[in-house]
Image (cartoon, rainbow, N blue to C red):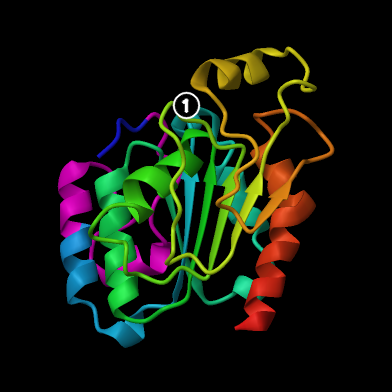
Amino acid sequence: MAIVFSYQWRRDPQHLVEKAGLGERVENARDERRFFEALEAMPDEALGDLCIVMGGFMDGLLGRAYRIIGELPPAMKGFDVYYREHDERAGTRCILKRYGRAGRRIILIGHSWGGSSLVLDVLAHADCRDIPVMALITLDPVAIRPPRFLPQVRRWLNIYLPYEKAPWSRENNVARLGRPWQYLRQADINYIPSRLCHSRALDMFKEFGESFIELRLMDE
């Protein structure tokens, strides 16, 4: 489990935490283990569809990707929405596997290192390669390692900054050091946001990610 900088970011949907009998929130590694044990034991009918939002570097303190949770489209009512940080890979795989076994629709959203972690450390992992994902959204993903092709992902939207044109701001320079992926031939759609600022995860999502999800849900 990652180091938690702020407990105002709820990692697990409240109704499932209550079903697990854990009180108000999951606060430490022991609670997390108990939650996953209870999640495994829950009947499939207790689970909704799944959305995981994964934040990038320092998102546990800044909450840039976390803000997306409050702006998900109304069409996603009924989804169980989880938040994880980029280094919470094992727990993310546990959640994905549980909902995959239940045959639920799955939407994944990751910003910066969170986007690359979803691709490289979650979806490309042997435990998750056969779990169908209806939509993957990567918001200016950053990683030293190269991206992977993900055959289990039905539609992949990659929103990225062209760094040859992006301003030399502090946030963009941090992303430059992390090696942004930029245009991805593995993605179905590549989109450049109107505001070229790496830290604006919510703005990137609202500009095109929200409508992308709505269209995907209409297609299902």
Q: Quadrant of the N terminus?
A: top left
Q: Residue at x 27, y 70 (%)?
A: 98
Q: Is residue 104 left or right of residue 135?
A: left
- Residue 52, compared with residue 143, is above or below; it is below
Q: Which residue is mark 1?
A: 58
Q: Residue at x 57, y 47 (%)?
A: 138
Q: Residue at x 29, y 56 (%)?
A: 93
Q: Nearer the viewer, residue 4 or 218?
A: 218
Q: Is residue 41 left or right of residue 215?
A: left
Q: Quadrant of the C terminus?
A: bottom right
Q: Is residue 4 left or right of residue 73?
A: left
Q: Nearer the viewer, residue 62 or 131?
A: 131
The x and y percentages for residue 200 are 69, 34
Q: Which residues are magenta?
A: 5-34
Answer whether residue 136 is magenta in the image: no
Q: Secondary structure at mark 1?
A: loop
Q: Is residue 84 visible?
A: no
The x and y percentages for residue 205 are 69, 49
Residue 210 sits in quarter: bottom right
Circle 1: residue type: Met
The x and y percentages for residue 106 are 47, 69
